[in-house]
Amino acid sequence: MAGPLAAQDAGPSTDTADALYCAERKLGYWFYCVRPTPAPRDAEPQAPPSATEELDAITGTLRELKAQAILHPTPDNVAAYIRFQREQLDRASLFSDVWQRALWQDPALDYTLERPVGALAKKQWQDTRAAERDVAMARLSERYGLFYFFAQTCGACEVMSPIVKAVASRWRITVRAISTDGGPSRHFPDYSVEKGQRPRMGLEPGITPAVVLWDSVGKRPIPIGYGVLSADELQDRIYLLTSKEAGHDY
């Protein structure tokens, strides 16, 4: 009979074999009868919040307290908002104080050494800058000339024309005055009428007055500005655009 024989051939079950082999003989751990209990895993330590997260939390708390004070203006809510806001104002004041002390002690951090803001230092810087500008402007006519675009019907041109003429006369810069509407200028009697000069230079059409510096070496126009400019501003722009690379004056 296959059934009983198969059962006999199969021998004792696994559980019975474990009991005979392990429990009765008491073989213990080293014969793999007792499974080791795994050590409890310690909870992984959480990283402390970053400074950005702390600042975001402060901002969030301040907004929440403010919202509570506005929506539910009880004395406690308003006082809580004022108290927390005051703490942050004190924090900002401390930051500002340490910032100032750091600038005093490290000249590499102090931008005012390059661009003074104090009245005395600023006046000295402006005088030095004006002297440098005048030296550069004195040599300008060797390489540059001016195109001045105006219109007879342009009120701003009546203001700008004598300024352009005075600056050009002071530094002996040749000016080519161009009328955009064909009308004359009492300041530039030897004007010419525009015949597509601005589009060929890649300049903005239709805006007057417009001052453009012409580089005779590079054969290129350098737009100085549109609208009314003071004499100092006009000279400063010419100086910066011809003598200073972008980013070197700030």
Image (spheres, helix red, strand yellow):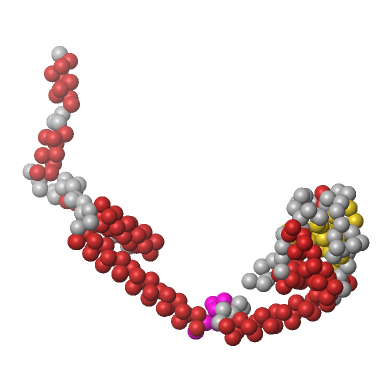
Q: Is residue 75 above or below residue 106?
A: above
Queried whether the magenta region covers residue 106, the answer comes back as yes
Total number of numbered labels? 0
Q: Is residue 239 above or below residue 74?
A: below
Residue located 40% across and 74% down the image: 95
Task: Locate residue 78: give its quadrant.
Answer: bottom left
Which SS type dominates the magenta stretch? Answer: helix
Direction from residue 23 to residue 187 in the image, left or right: right
Residue located 75% across and 77% down the image: 133
Residue 215 visible to an observer of this rendering: no
* Quadrant in which the C terminus is drawn: bottom right
Residue located 88% across and 49% down the image: 195
* Quadrant in which the N terminus is drawn: top left
Q: Nearer the viewer, residue 6 or 246?
A: 246
Give the residue at the far left of this rendering: 24
Q: Position of residue 47 (x, y in %)?
A: 33, 60
Residue located 59% across and 80% down the image: 116
Residue 99 visible to an observer of this rendering: yes
Q: Position of residue 205 (x, y in %)?
A: 77, 50
The boundaries of the magenta stretch are 105-112
